[in-house]
Amino acid sequence: MVSNPLLTIKDYGQSIWMDNLTRDLIKSGQLKDMISSRGIRGITSNPAIFEKAIKGNALYDADIEAGIRAGLPVQKIYESLIFEDIRNACDIFRPIYEESGGLDGYVSIEVPPTIADDTEATIKEARRYYQEIGRENVMIKIPGTLSGSPAVKQVITEGINVNVTLLFAVKSYETAAWAYIEGLEARVNQGEDISKIASVASFFLSRIDTNVDETIDERIKTIGSTESPNLKARLQAIKGKVAIANAKIAYQKYKEIIQHERWKALAEKGANVQRLLWASTSTKNPEYNDVMYVNELVGLDTVNTLPPATIEACSDHCDIANRLETGVEEAYSLIESLKEPDININLDQVMNTVLDEGIDKFVQPFQSLMSSMEEKVKQLAPA
């Protein structure tokens, strides 16, 4: 009998987390089953996931009605729903948290995406979420934006686990890594323990390829007969390759950082590495291998967070091997080739665009969910 490829990934130093959380999964026992049958070692959530989970789902109605009777505003009713789901998920993952010594078993929850540009509000909400949820293995998601980085440092200083999310550019990852280090250093200076703090840096993939591929397709349409005859082939060869190359370069940067004297000093005091987490790992282009963002990025001290469909695809036909450090020179060459005059893809511009889009893709579902909650509160309120 062929073993499930997902169950072998742990042997390579990578953990699989699931990018999905619903009350149905918790109540039905399916989440517990996926931990054993699919090797899931953590779970993440975001406003888009909660919108799908709560909208039109009667499973939440009793708690919404309880919130109405208690006179809670809509925002507080919403938080009561998601905090309950997060607590229950944390309890389910608690054995993994303990067995792994705090490496895995985390449940991530994002602060409201509407405050992504407000450092102080982000710190305040991260602190409040952590306290109200009241679980050691909860991880607060903070966007890796200019406003988010100082929030990451402060929250780490306070001993709160952080998932730095929406990282696209390697420079943004570096900023997130140093914010984590600076937070740990500040905590050490306060005489506090740093051995029980965990952080991941969520590095997004498929959205980069989607953006670059669209640019390439438009360029190909405009290639004239007088241009280099192999230009079309060169452009085609870039499609579907940039995100993985970018991730491999980020991992090399991670290896540099953990060799730095400042990190080594923290490690001696018990600090845990901030693992790179591969996010946005469902393949958007049906022409591509549906598990390419898994197969190509297995490596030590990493996490891959997969949506349910990708989990099932990978359990069926992933080809697991340590490829994260293969083809690294080719990755650098590919990224450098984007600057060539006839290719001319501005990667910095791509990264800024996908970051803005990424924030919007969390803000819009959040706002939609709040509108749905208001409607549901009206429907369930006693006449």
Image: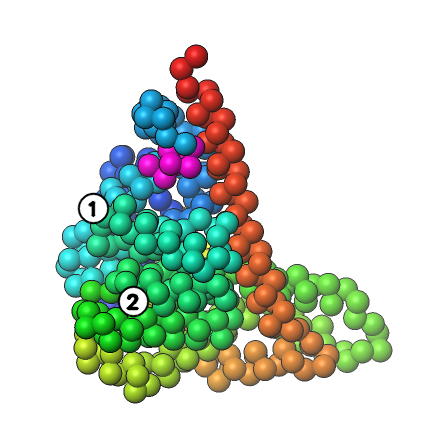
**Can you give x and y, in whole percent of width and height, for residue 322 in the image?**
34, 73
**Can you give x and y, in whole percent of width and height, for residue 216 in the image?**
68, 67
Q: Residue furthest bottom?
A: 261
Q: From which residue to which does the magenta span run?
A: 74-80
At horizontal 55% and vertical 45% (from top left) the residue drawn is: 364
Is 159 situated above or below 52?
below
| Circle 1 residues within 10 Å: few <14, some 14–19, many ≥20 | some
Determine whether the residue tagged by mark 2 lies in a helix, strand or loop. helix
Is 254 situated above or below 278?
below
At horizontal 29% and vertical 81% (from top left) the residue drawn is: 263
- Main structural element of the magenta stretch: helix, strand or loop? helix
Which quarter of the picture shows residue 277? bottom left
At horizontal 65% and vertical 80% (from top left) the residue drawn is: 339
**Can you give x and y, in whole percent of width and height, for residue 369 in the image?**
48, 37
- Residue 267 visible in the shown view: yes
| Circle 2 residues within 10 Å: few <14, some 14–19, many ≥20 | many
